[in-house]
Amino acid sequence: MAEAAGDGPEGAVADVAAGPSRAVPAAAHEAASRAAPTGDGGLSERDRAVLAMERRSWSGPGAKERAVRERLGLSPVRYYQLLNALLDDERALACDPVTVNRLRRLRDSRRGQR
């Protein structure tokens, strides 16, 4: 007998990827981050999603924070904590060198201004 949608791993993935309108608790994302890394440089889905958010340009000051909450289910503070950890991760550099190097340069220049 075939499994109903949402029963089994295929349904769970489809539910998580349902889109930005679905609010997912941060605890669920925390658990997903501890899941086994996927084939793209050893980074988790969440790590790759964080890098993808940083590749985009944003129209206004609140647009990025709103997208972080809606798409990733993270607070902006937690998002930037994860992003900073990713910038120090060589797997992230191997996965997206242009974005990681650009963000490392920005971070270093901001630290130099303090």
Image (cartoon, grey):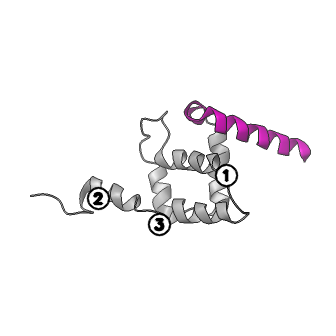
Q: Secondary structure at mark 2?
A: helix
Q: Looking at the rendering, which quadrant does residue 39 occupy? A: top left
Does residue 32 appear in this view? yes
Query: Counting residues from the N terminus, which is met first, the one under dot 2 or under dot 1?
Result: 2
Q: Secondary structure at mark 1?
A: loop
Query: Which label was assigned to residue 57?
Result: 1
Quadrant (top left/top right/bottom left/bottom right) for the N terminus: bottom left
Horizontal and vertical percent for residue 7? 24, 61
Residue located farthest toward the front when viewing the structure as drawn: 59
Residue that appears at 63% across and 46% down: 55
Query: Counting residues from the N terminus, which is met first, the one under dot 3 or under dot 1?
Result: 3
Residue of label 2: 11
Residue that appears at 56% across and 33% down: 91
Q: Residues within 10 Å of mark 3 (few under 14, many from 20)?
A: some
Residue of label 3: 24
Horizontal and vertical percent for residue 100? 66, 37
Residue that appears at 19% across and 63% down: 4
Q: Residues within 10 Å of mark 2 (few under 14, many from 20)?
A: some
Left or right, 73 with reference to 10? right
Give the CA distance from mark 3 to mark 1.
24 Å
* Part of the protein shown in magenta: 90-114
